[in-house]
Structures are given as structure tokens and as C-alpha cells.
Amino acid sequence: MRGLGRDFNFLLVARAVSIIGDQAALIALIFMVKGHGSWSTAALLGGTGIAMVLTSTWVGKLIDRESVKKVIIITSLVQSIICFALIHSNLYAVLILNLILGAGQAIVIAATGAWTPSLVEKENLGKAFGQMQVVLSIASLAGYGIGGVLVGKFGVSAALLLDAISFLLLVPMLLIMKKDRIGNPEVDKDGKMKGGFKIVWQNPSLRAILISMTAFVTALMIFNPLEVYLTTEILGAGPAGYGVINMVWSASIAVGSMLITKTMKPEWGNAKPVMISFVAVGFSMVAIGYAPNLIFLSVALFLCGIIVAGFNIFISPLIVKNSVESELGRVNATIGAINSAGSAVGTALGGFLGHLLPIRFVIAMAGVLAASSLIFTGKKLLAAEKK
């Protein structure tokens, strides 16, 4: 974290603390609802994405209008209260409160994306987003582990209490930060701000980035509901083996983020690495789909995770480069919401196609979809680099 500034380091630590609490709480919430059937688990896990989609317009305008520091502090306090309330909630209250937590996550993610360019030098944006991904990947792994231990030994209340405390810990860290991003948006003659979707769609470069990212996320999520069947029923892994495969994927994101952040150079640019990621992920998903054994699958998944880490690192500066600073909140919220919608569509499509077609074929075709999206957006992505 050297060289990127005191305030950025504080933001990194704050996000890590929050993610540890969030993932621990997710374990608790899953155990609170799973006894009511698969529909309740699906509603819980889908709630965050639904909240992001429904609140994206409001969230983006809020971030571009107000002090980002103040918005995140207030959001953290509200989320802490929600976590305390969840401790004594029934199923339906959990599902409703989870939507509010999802809206809070949407605010924090979009706000962090808009605030980061204000905290680091332009040439360090790629490294900043890379370091953010490294820290959040490690924090996610730690959060899952801590959550599992707390729920197993002390019950769901302990994990929810941890999340509530983690939100409260953010407040002093954010107050210590000196730099803020205070919105100063352009408004029309009626005093209204332009909507995020209009901003993105009217900008050819941002439109290409949005289409590419959504296709990429949708293709990856087609694999999501099928990986358990590929790993266990086709390749014969037991519960322990399935757990190891998932650990390989999580570790690959963290390792990939560290390697790429350490080795990346300004002359690489951002658009070309993103385009290489599309093609490389496509090939790796074909390899995953037709993996002959668990060892081959582990290697293919690890390589795919490193590539996905690179995609995430290089796409974020490209979004910033092609956005007006005063519109970053709306741009980030819109792209995040549409990607969440793509994730939901991909998951549903994977489940549907997995019933109709061979699972290996569906996974491989998802890889082809990821790579082939460049046919429609490749030139625009290269143009976004030159802007």
C-alpha cells in the first residue's frame, strides 16, 4: 500500500473491516433462512442484486450531489442498526432488512468507486483498484471463515453482532480521512440531474464498456449454478473436494490481484488487457467445461480466477478515464446495477440450460459468449483507451 496516500490506505482498511463483517453476517443470514426451503435462500441471495438495481438511479444522484464521506458514515450507522435488528427478526423481516443492507452496499460500492480517483494520482489508479481488490479478496475469505466459526460455536447472533460493530468501526476511520469528494453536478433548467443510464448510454465508450462488462458477467454467472454438478456429479468430488475447489477459485482472485498489481506497467494501458481477458476467460471456461479430472479443473479455475482479477483491475480505470468526474457516482451505480441484473440473468440462464443441454457444453458455450462479445465492442474499447 506504499505510495498511494494516507487517505487511500484508511479507505482500504475501512472497506476490509466492512467486508469481513458483511461476509460473516451472510453466513448467519443463510443459516437463519435455509430451514424455510430453497426459495428463501434464493430470495436472500438475490436480494442484494435486486436492491442495487432498484436503487441505482437514486444512489448515483445521491453520491454525485453530497459529501461522499458523510454519505458513507450515515449509511454505515444505518447498516449497523439493521444488523442489530436482524438478531431478533423472523424470516420475512430478514428478507426485507436484507434489501436495505443491499441498498447500503450499493451506496458504499458506488461511493468508493467515485471517491478513489480523488485520493490517488491518475497514473496510480490501476494499482489503487488492484490493491482494493487484493484487500477485499482476503477480507472476504477471512469473513467467511470467521462467520462459519462464530455461527458454529456461538450462533447467528454473534456473526450479526460482529457485522454491526464493523460498521461502527468505520466511522472513526472515515472521520480521520482529510480528503472528501463533495458533489457539484450539472443540472438542467428545472434543477434536475441527468440520470446515470442516459449518461452511460449516450457516451459511446461507456456504452461499449457497459455492454462488454455485462456480457462478461452474464457468461461467468452461467457457470455459477452448474459448477457444483460439474465438480461433484461429473468429476466425482465429495464435500471436502468441492470445498477445496471453491477455495482455489477464491485464492486465485487474491493471488491474481497481487501479481498483476505488482507487475502492471503504464504502457500496458487498460483496454488491451481487458480485451485479452475476454479471450483468455473464454478459452479457460472451455477448458473448465471439458476438464477430465479434478486436478485439471483446479488448474483451469485458478488460471481463470487470475484472468478475472486482471479484468477487474483494468476495467475500473477505463471507466474513470471515460467519465466526467462529477458524474462518477451515477456512472458507477448504473454499471453496477446492470451488471447485477446480468449476474441474475446468467445464473437463471445457466440453471435453465443445464436442464436442457449437457452441462459441459453449456459451460464451454458460456466461454465462447464471453470472448465473442468483443466482435461488437472491441473497436469501441480501443477507442476508449485513446480518449
Image: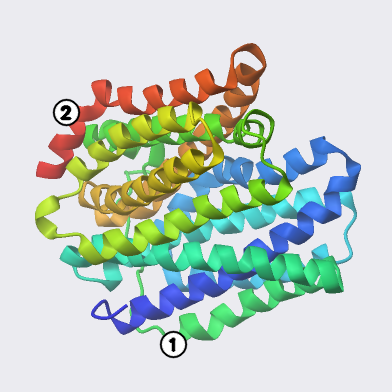
User: In the picture provided, is 330 more to the left or to the right than 358?
Assistant: left
Q: Specify the amino acid type for callout 2.
A: Lys
Q: Which residue is mark 1?
A: 176
* Residue 144, position as x, y percentages in the image: 65, 63
Nearer-N-terminus badge (2/1): 1
Name which residue lies at 39% across and 23% down: 369
- Which corner quadrant holds the C terminus? top left
User: In the picture provided, is 209 more to the left or to the right than 135?
Assistant: left
The residues tagged by marks 2 and 1 sit, at their Cα atoms, a distance apart of: 44 Å
Q: Specify the amino acid type for callout 1.
A: Ile
* Residue 96, position as x, y percentages in the image: 77, 49
Name which residue lies at 50% across and 67% down: 138
**Closer mark to the observer between disc 2 and disc 1:** 2
Residue 16 shows in this picture? yes
Residue 193 shows in this picture? no
Disc 2 vs disc 1: Cβ atoms closer than 8 Å? no
Number of the label disc, if any, that sits on residue 185? none
* Residue 275, position as x, y percentages in the image: 24, 36
* Residue 178, position as x, y percentages in the image: 35, 84
Q: Which residue is mark 2?
A: 379
Q: Secondary structure at mark 1?
A: helix
Name which residue lies at 75% across and 70% down: 149
| In the foreground, 379 or 235 | 235
